[in-house]
């Protein structure tokens, strides 16, 4: 059986053609859902409120979904995605960790795999190097910050007082060149006239390149390679960089690469044998590092001087061995929360507004009575439509809402250049601040307050507004 390359390309492009209208139609439906038709009899004030509500509604998807792929111009957004996924430069956490082996081994296999057309090896490495340079130069050092401009790099390199090293000068000049590619500065954030054409063109080029690389392989391997390439292309353009939509691809692609590397152990080429041993040693080191990291079971909220040297979180060990109760463990991770949840669970019909936090696990019938508002989509809309905070709190109480749970670190999730989630969170804090219709039940935030008898000394009290000693993670309020 012979697979005709032209037939495969036509099949893939036809599939893309039929998929694209459905995407556009979905986008139109989404846009229509976000648009609130203005009625002729509405006042100007009502129109402004509805427009503000519409704006808030549209930011939620941008804040939650687009943060995985980034907020660069469209061209950079897709081009840097392999690097972003590998290095977690947009969103951090073990739940999106895919390791670096896939990105590391693929260029190596393409480089050493061409038998007759050696120039394709050099062309492959040149393309990978160019994409890598563009990716590195357009990624911020710290997530959520803007990338360094070419002018800032030039200023740093030209500052004799800082004495840039030879390596800094070399990399800095490469970054400057990458940022000064003709036409790049005119790119818009969400639209241009060539990004998708370049992505499709790159896909077609990679198809021919990989086809040349595997043409001597069995039909099964050739089919798997084409399937993985098509999967990667669809993942690139349709999933916004969200890792779990590509789990199947990452698993199969890794196994496919390992199988190719394993076959090199018997190769006559000395280069391929070195690749086998080098990749094997690298994989072993990575497995040891990954195992150690996952076994450590630490995160920023629990890591401190007391338990930093331990492999396990001792409170979990005490709970599993029967020394601590479930409530004890809950209070260790979320100080003061046990009494608050006991009250919340007295009335299993009381409705709850929850902004972030993992507290669904502690709330009975959470699937029926908890309203999730992680991006503050709903609360911001209500605050815009009813600016009187006291009246809004009363209205929510009358509608059956008894509690408001807030993640105090919600604003830290904002990766948008406009900081829309930060603004909505500030609006929520203003709604809560000194609102007589809200009562603070519990929080783990510690504030510095002066002693009543000696203002020169301070004491630590639990609260939300004031001089913060420990930021904490949550606050639970009750509607009066």
Image (spheres, grey):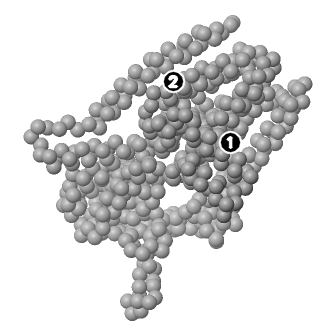
Pick the front one: 92 or 461: 92
Whether residue 112 appears in this view of the structure is: yes
* Quarter of image, res 315: bottom right
Q: Nearer the viewer, residue 41 or 187?
A: 187
Say left or right for 118 vs 377. right
Q: Residue at x 52, y 16 (%)?
A: 13
Sequence-first disc among 1 and 2: 1
Asked if residue 345 can be seen in this view, the reply is no
Q: Position of residue 95 (x, y in %)?
A: 57, 46
According to the image, label 1 marks what residue?
100
Q: Residue at x 38, y 60 (%)?
A: 406
**Label 1 element class:** loop
Marks 1/2: CA–CA distance = 28 Å
Quadrant for the C terminus, please: bottom left
List the single residue furthest toward the top: 1
Give the farthest residue toward the bottom: 453
Q: Residues within 10 Å of mark 1 (few under 14, many from 20)?
A: some
Q: Are marks 1 and 2 in contact (CB under 8 Å)?
A: no
The residue drawn where x is 66% and y is 66% is 308
Residue position for label 2: 197
- Residue 179 location (% of width, % of height): 57, 41
Within 10 Å of the Cα at label 2, are there few (<14), some (14-19), or many (20+) other Cα atoms? few
Q: Residue at x 30, y 44 (%)?
A: 55
Locate residue 452: give its quadrant.
Answer: bottom left
Q: Residue 360 in the image: x percent, y percent?
A: 42, 53
- Rendered-image quadrant of the N terminus: top right
């Amino acid at each position: 059986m012979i697979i005709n390359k032209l037939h495969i390309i036509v099949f893939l492009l036809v599939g893309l053609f039929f998929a694209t209208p459905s995407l556009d139609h979905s986008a139109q439906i989404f846009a229509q859902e976000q648009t609130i038709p203005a009625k002729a009899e509405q006042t100007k004030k009502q129109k402004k409120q509805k427009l503000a509500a519409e704006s808030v509604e549209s930011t939620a998807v941008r804040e939650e979904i687009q943060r995985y792929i980034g907020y660069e111009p469209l061209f950079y957004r897709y081009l840097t995605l392999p690097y972003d996924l590998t290095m977690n430069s947009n969103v951090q956490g073990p739940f999106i960790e895919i390791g670096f082996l896939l990105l590391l081994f693929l260029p190596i296999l393409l480089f050493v795999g061409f038998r007759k057309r050696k120039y394709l090896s050099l062309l492959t490495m040149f393309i990978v190097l160019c994409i890598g340079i563009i990716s590195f130069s357009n990624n911020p050092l710290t997530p959520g910050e803007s990338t360094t401009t070419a002018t800032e790099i030039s200023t740093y390199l030209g500052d004799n007082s800082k004495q840039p090293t030879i390596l800094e000068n070399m990399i800095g000049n490469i970054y400057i060149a990458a940022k000064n590619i003709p036409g790049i500065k005119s790119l818009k954030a969400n639209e241009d006239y060539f990004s998708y054409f370049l992505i499709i063109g790159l896909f077609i080029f990679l198809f021919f390149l990989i086809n040349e690389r595997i043409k001597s392989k069995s039909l099964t391997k050739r089919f798997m390679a084409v399937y993985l390439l098509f999967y990667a292309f669809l993942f690139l353009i349709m999933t916004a960089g969200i890792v779990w939509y590509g789990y199947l691809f990452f698993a199969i692609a890794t196994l496919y690469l390992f199988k190719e590397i394993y076959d090199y152990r018997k190769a006559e080429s000395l280069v391929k044998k070195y690749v086998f041993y080098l990749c094997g040693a690298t994989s072993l080191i990575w497995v040891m590092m990954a195992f150690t990291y996952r076994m450590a079971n630490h995160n920023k909220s629990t890591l401190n001087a007391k338990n930093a040297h331990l492999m396990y979180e001792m409170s979990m060990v005490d709970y599993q061995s029967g020394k601590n109760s479930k409530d004890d463990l809950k209070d260790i991770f979320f100080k003061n929360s046990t009494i608050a949840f006991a009250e919340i669970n007295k009335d299993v019909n009381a409705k709850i507004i929850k902004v972030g936090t993992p507290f669904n696990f502690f709330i009975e019938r959470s699937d029926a009575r908890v309203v999730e508002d992680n991006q503050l989509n709903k609360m911001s809309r209500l605050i815009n439509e009813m600016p009187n905070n006291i009246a809004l709190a009363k209205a929510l109480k009358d509608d059956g809402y008894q509690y408001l749970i807030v993640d105090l670190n919600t604003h830290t999730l904002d990766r948008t250049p406009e900081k829309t989630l930060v603004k909505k969170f500030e609006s929520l804090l203003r709604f809560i601040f000194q609102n007589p219709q809200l009562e603070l039940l519990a929080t783990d935030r510690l504030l510095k307050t002066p002693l009543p008898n000696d203002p020169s000394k301070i004491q630590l009290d639990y609260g939300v507004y004031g001089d913060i000693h420990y930021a904490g993670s949550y606050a639970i309020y009750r509607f009066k």
